[in-house]
Image (tube, helix red, strand yellow):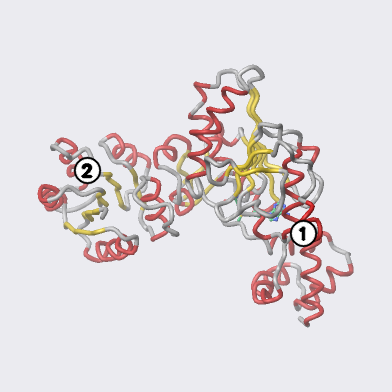
């Protein structure tokens, strides 16, 4: 089963994202900041990371840079999911190795479209 | 609106836009045409039908037709038809048209432009392989309202996130507050024109590739057959037609054949005579 790690400091967002991702038949784990996210990757490398930008302890950008340096850390698809909705942030994220970028607010349609584009959803998934 | 008035409206829509509304779609008519009544200061749907029947206002007729169209679309919709374009059709025609270096593409129901712009971006990405080529993308629709939006090429955050890969967004869009505008270099590749598929379109000329997606579903079988036959007439022997995910030509026309290797891709039948199969002639 495709395994998705959600890294976001907002419990509400984690819950919303988890519900959507689970409805797409993916397995989900959560982390509340970048450091906790890296620890989770250490235990099991996800197929996809849904990543917030601004978080205490370690932000999403630092998480991504660190993840990409680690053994096996180049494989997960990383999708930023953030309120930083400007070209500057998007470009920085891509340069740091992000695969996709979702500007909040988002919904199931957008998330499914991005996952499909990354080849993480089956063709028959109807969203 | 009485039953007779509803019937008259259905007949009008069928005759003018091909839209085949089933008798149980009364609610749809009511929900979509109320705003037309408001705009034209018409007090009821009954009155609207009466005005249409009088034939006095073509503006009202067009507004009614437009209001009944479904314009849902998004960038790279269903993904597969665009992978097909990039991985199969483009390489094929780059080879086949190497001498003429000319490629003509038609999006036959383009709505707000996401489909032709998706193709235009893919062509731009392939530009290095097509130096000196003349490429036409003609994008048509029956609704002037959606065409207007398509020509402007400005989309909201929801629209640019639904199917458009972020790298292409960064490359080909500029941010205007909450909105995203497509680059002039992409916009200028697409020629948007008003066109009603149930009317004669032979003057458009020949097209190597035709995308006619998610519009035939609104027509009845004889209308579908008729439109498909006329589309086939605009295709050269090696032309390609791409239909929507839920659409098929099966049992509708023999002027086209399914490409067995790729879902949704059709070519011209070698034996295609431009008429429907004898067995189906009765339904015309
Ligand atoms: C659902 S959209 C499809 C857009 C796009 N091809 C896609 O698949 O995403 C259908 C479009 O067909 C247009 N349409 C409906 N009847 C038509 C007709 N008779 N001639 C031309 N366009 C028509 C509508 O205005 C609408 O924009």
Residue occupying image coordinates x 81% and y 61%: B15
Residue A45: percent from left, percent from top: 17, 47
Q: Is residue B67 shown left or right of residue A93?
A: right
Residue occupying image coordinates x 57% and y 24%: B94
Relative vertical location of residue B275 with respect to residue B99 in this rendering, above or below: below
Residue occupying image coordinates x 54% and y 31%: B123
- Write down the quadrant of residue B13 in the picture: bottom right
Disc count in the image? 2
Chain that bears disc 2: A
Residue occupying image coordinates x 19% and y 58%: A29
Q: Is residue B226 shown left or right of residue A39?
A: right
Q: Residue furthest bottom?
A: B2
Residue at image mark 1? B62
Distance Cα–Cα, label 2 vs label 1: 51 Å
Quadrant the N terminus of chain A occupies: bottom left
**Which structural element holds mark 1?**
helix
Relative vertical location of residue B143 with respect to residue A61 in this rendering, above or below: below
Residue B268's disc number? none
Same chain for the residues under marks 2 and 1 in the image: no
The answer to whether the beta carbon of the residue marked 1 is less than 8 Å from any atom of ligand 1 is no
Residue at image mark 2? A61
**Which structural element holds mark 2?**
helix
**Is residue B59 visible in the rendered structure shown here?**
no
**Is residue B208 visible in the rendered structure shown here?**
yes
Q: Residues within 10 Å of mark 1 (few under 14, many from 20)?
A: some
């Amino acid at each position: 089963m495709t395994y998705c790690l959600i890294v976001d400091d907002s419990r509400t967002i984690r819950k919303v994202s988890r519900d959507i991702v689970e409805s797409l038949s993916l397995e989900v784990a959560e982390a509340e900041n970048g450091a906790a996210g890296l620890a989770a990757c250490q235990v099991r490398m996800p197929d996809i990371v849904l990543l917030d930008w601004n978080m205490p302890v370690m932000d999403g950008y630092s998480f991504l840079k660190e993840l990409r340096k680690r053994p096996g850390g180049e494989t997960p698809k990383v999708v930023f999911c953030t309120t930083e909705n400007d070209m500057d942030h998007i470009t920085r994220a891509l340069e740091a190795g992000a695969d996709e970028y979702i500007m909040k607010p988002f919904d199931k349609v957008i998330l499914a479209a991005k996952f499909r584009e990354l080849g993480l959803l089956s063709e028959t998934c109807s969203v | 609106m009485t039953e007779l008035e509803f019937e008259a409206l259905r007949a009008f829509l069928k005759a003018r836009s091909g839209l085949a509304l089933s008798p149980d779609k009364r609610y749809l008519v009511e929900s979509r045409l109320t705003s037309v009544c408001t705009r034209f200061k018409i007090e009821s749907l009954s009155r609207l039908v009466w005005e249409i029947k009088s034939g006095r206002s073509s503006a009202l007729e067009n507004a009614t037709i437009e209001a009944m169209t479904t314009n849902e679309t998004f960038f790279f919709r269903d993904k597969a038809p665009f992978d097909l374009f990039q991985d199969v059709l483009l390489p094929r025609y780059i080879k086949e048209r190497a001498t003429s270096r000319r490629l003509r593409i038609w999006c036959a129901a383009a709505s707000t432009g996401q489909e032709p712009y998706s193709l235009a971006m893919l062509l731009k990405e392939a530009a290095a392989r097509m130096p000196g080529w003349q490429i036409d993308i003609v994008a048509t629709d029956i609704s002037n309202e959606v065409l207007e939006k398509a020509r402007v090429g400005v989309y909201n955050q929801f629209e640019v996130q639904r199917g458009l890969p972020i790298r292409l967004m960064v490359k080909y869009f500029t941010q205007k507050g909450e909105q995203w505008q497509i680059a002039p270099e992409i916009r200028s590749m697409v020629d948007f024109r008003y066109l009603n598929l149930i009317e004669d379109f032979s003057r458009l000329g020949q097209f190597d590739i035709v995308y006619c997606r998610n519009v035939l579903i609104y027509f009845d079988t004889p209308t579908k057959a008729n439109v498909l036959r006329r589309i086939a007439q605009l295709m050269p022997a090696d032309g390609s037609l791409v239909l929507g995910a839920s659409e098929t030509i099966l049992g509708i026309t023999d002027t086209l054949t399914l490409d067995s290797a790729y879902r949704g891709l059709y070519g011209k039948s070698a034996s295609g005579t431009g008429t429907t199969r004898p067995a189906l002639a009765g339904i015309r």
